[in-house]
Image: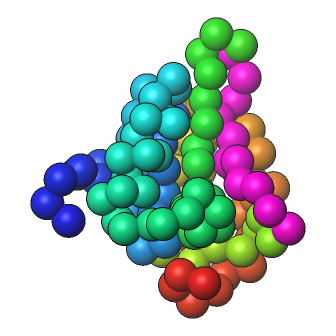
Amino acid sequence: MAGIKHSKPDARAGWISPEGKFYACAWYQHESLGQNLMLEFGYKSVEDWERDWLRLKYDPATRAAPFIERGGFDRYSVTQGQFNTLHDIFTAFLLGGIDVGNLKEYIQRARVRDGRR
């Protein structure tokens, strides 16, 4: 994809692709970035998009820890790439003294699947 560039998984908010690429955004830009990524990667429905991608949320106004948000019944099903990126983010947060929120629990419960569903 030539349009939107992925970044190092060192931000507190963004999207994680099924391949494990991290697309950072400001805490208030999830929806707009998500819509752009959905179009860029050819998703036809929001349901398919939300099933395949992970959202890392953070709201500095509440000072809450970053957390993974995913809807649906199978919320802990991730690809190997997503799992690796989650682990990298978790490690970076720990080393940086940042509260890890629900990342530890999410990683412990994650079930790795192959690619897109």
Q: How many marks?
A: 0
> Based on the displayed image, in which of its 4 quarters is residue 65 positioned?
top right
| Percent position of residue 46, x then y | 59, 57
Residue at the far top in the pictured view: 61
Q: Which residues are magenta?
A: 63-73
Q: Is residue 75 left or right of residue 4?
A: right
Residue at the far right in the pictured view: 73
Tell me what residue is drawn at x 35 percent, y 65 percent.
Answer: 41
| Percent position of residue 66, x then y | 65, 35
Residue at the far bottom in the pictured view: 114
Tell me what residue is drawn at x 68 percent, y 15 percent.
Answer: 63
Report the quarter where the C terminus lies: bottom right
> Based on the displayed image, in which of its 4 quarters is residue 79 positioned?
bottom right
Residues 89 and 16: in front is 16
Tell me what residue is drawn at x 66 percent, y 82 percent.
Answer: 112
Residues 53 and 98: in front is 53
Residues 52 and 39: in front is 39
| Percent position of residue 30, x then y | 50, 36
Is residue 20 within the magenta segment?
no
Residues 46 and 66: in front is 46
